[in-house]
């Protein structure tokens, strides 16, 4: 089955009672037992399993070519489950440039039990050098990264990691399985914030993990999911399944628009630099081309004239809304450094753009007039 067909069918079942074509939302928290004490439909209690969550997990696993998936109430909850699955004292290697909220969680919560090293994940020699024999248990990749759109070589890092029996988890939120399949490139786990492209309409929070094999780490992650209970509600599962049905088509539109905007910005005199893996000028364009089938809809750019000039541009846009988050049908722009706080390494004249599905001519006209 091809990805468009999986996206539409793998998260849906026709209701056997009503024959409703779209799977209904099962809000019941509890499920009736049979006289012999068994659970005829396999459901006991909604934290452990729910029909909408199982449908979501089924489509998530199939989209990435994995064997199983766990859905969470947020991307951070998904990441959290991976860190909780590690033994205390484990060493984790993570990228310096990564989603700031997850890094905050690692620093504020997991640094108490885990030893975490941040490196430039696009530098393979740095990855190798930071491996601690016997204690490094996990390499966390985020590619393309947030907000600098850095590219990590998934295959090369996994090769290195597996020589040392280290597992690799890849945050694939920006690329989505439409454009990048980390499990095929050697990763053990893929992580998502489904709040972004999966939901696709900026109206549902969620996260996901997909595994390549059902090993002991995965069994631990599954227990953490159902025992901790950071699970999405049946309604949230329904919304995410609904969003996923159009994911392959939306991603094509996001990419086509982003590529045109990247080219437009690159030749604009007010722009200092554009960060987009689809541009030949991107430092890791060749690696991006070899591991991605498309470059997605996220880009960043720096503006001549510093933070003030960047603020003016963000404030002068009409269709592109100034707000955090990404991956929705509407274009969003954000001054990342002010969100990330005083310790950020993000340039102060940088704006991150989540390119939406509006007409490209309107988006470019909006940017052109704001840059004047
Ligand atoms: C948003 C995001 C997260 C965190 O997901 P939430 O759903 O906000 O908890 C993690 N990684 C990336 C790349 C993100 O964009």
Image (cartoon, rainbow, N blue to C red):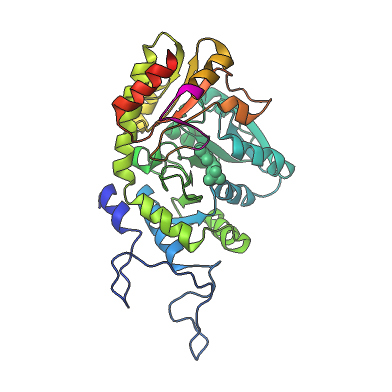
Residue 142: in sight, yes or no? yes
Q: Quadrant of residue 201?
A: top left
Q: Residue at x 37, y 43 (%)?
A: 177
Q: Residue at x 38, y 34 (%)?
A: 356
Q: Residue at x 30, y 70 (%)?
A: 20
Magenta residues, start to end: 315-325
Image quadrant in which the C terminus is located: top left
Residue 134: in sight, yes or no? no
Q: Nearer the viewer, residue 106 or 162?
A: 106
Q: Quadrant of residue 151?
A: top left
Q: Is residue 321 magenta?
A: yes
Q: Is residue 74 magenta?
A: no
In the picture as drawn, the residue positioned furthest to the right comes out as 112
How many marks overall? Answer: 0
Is 340 rendered above or below residue 209? above
Indicate the position of residue 216 as horizontal and vertical percent values. Answer: 55, 57
Is 67 rendered above or below residue 188? below
Indicate the position of residue 250 as horizontal and vertical percent values. Answer: 32, 41
Is 50 rendered above or below residue 181? below
Q: Nearer the viewer, residue 113 or 60?
A: 60
Indicate the position of residue 262 as horizontal and vertical percent values. Answer: 37, 21
Main secondary structure along the magenta-highlighted residues: loop
Is 63 rendered above or below residue 9? above
In the picture as drawn, the residue positioned furthest to the bottom comes out as 35
């Amino acid at each position: 089955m091809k990805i468009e067909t999986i996206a539409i069918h793998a998260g849906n079942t026709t209701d056997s009672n009503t024959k409703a074509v779209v799977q209904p939302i099962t809000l019941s928290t509890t499920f009736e037992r049979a006289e012999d004490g068994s659970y005829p439909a396999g459901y006991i209690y909604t934290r452990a399993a729910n029909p909408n969550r199982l449908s979501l997990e089924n489509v998530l696993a199939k989209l990435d070519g994995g064997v199983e998936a766990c859905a969470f109430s947020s991307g951070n909850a998904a990441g959290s489950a991976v860190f909780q699955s590690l033994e205390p004292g484990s060493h984790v290697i993570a990228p310096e440039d990564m989603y700031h909220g997850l890094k905050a969680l690692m620093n504020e919560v997991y640094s108490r039990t885990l030893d975490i090293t941040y490196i430039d994940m696009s530098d393979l020699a740095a990855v190798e050098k930071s491996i601690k024999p016997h204690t490094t248990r996990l390499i966390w990749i985020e590619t393309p990264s947030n907000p600098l759109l850095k590219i990590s070589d998934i295959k090369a890092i996994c090769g290195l990691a597996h020589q040392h029996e280290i597992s690799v988890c890849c945050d694939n939120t920006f690329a989505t399985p439409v454009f990048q399949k980390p499990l095929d490139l050697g990763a053990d786990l893929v992580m998502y914030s489904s709040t972004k492209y999966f939901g696709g309409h900026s109206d549902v929070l969620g996260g996901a993990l997909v595994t390549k094999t059902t090993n002991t780490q995965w069994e631990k992650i599954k227990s953490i999911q159902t025992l901790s209970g950071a699970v999405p509600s049946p309604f949230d599962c329904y919304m995410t399944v609904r969003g996923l049905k159009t994911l392959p088509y939306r991603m094509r539109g996001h990419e086509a628009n982003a590529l045109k905007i990247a080219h437009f910005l690159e030749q604009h005199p007010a722009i200092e630099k554009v960060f987009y893996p689809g541009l030949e000028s991107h430092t890791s364009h060749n690696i991006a081309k070899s591991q991605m089938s498309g470059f997605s809809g996220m880009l960043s750019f720096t503006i001549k004239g510093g933070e003030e000039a960047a603020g003016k541009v963000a404030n002068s846009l009409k269709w592109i809304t100034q707000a955090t988050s990404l991956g929705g049908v509407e274009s969003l722009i954000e001054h990342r450094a002010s969100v990330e706080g005083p310790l950020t390494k993000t340039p102060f004249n940088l704006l991150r753009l989540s390119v939406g599905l509006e007409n490209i001519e309107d988006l470019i006209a909006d940017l052109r007039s704001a840059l004047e």
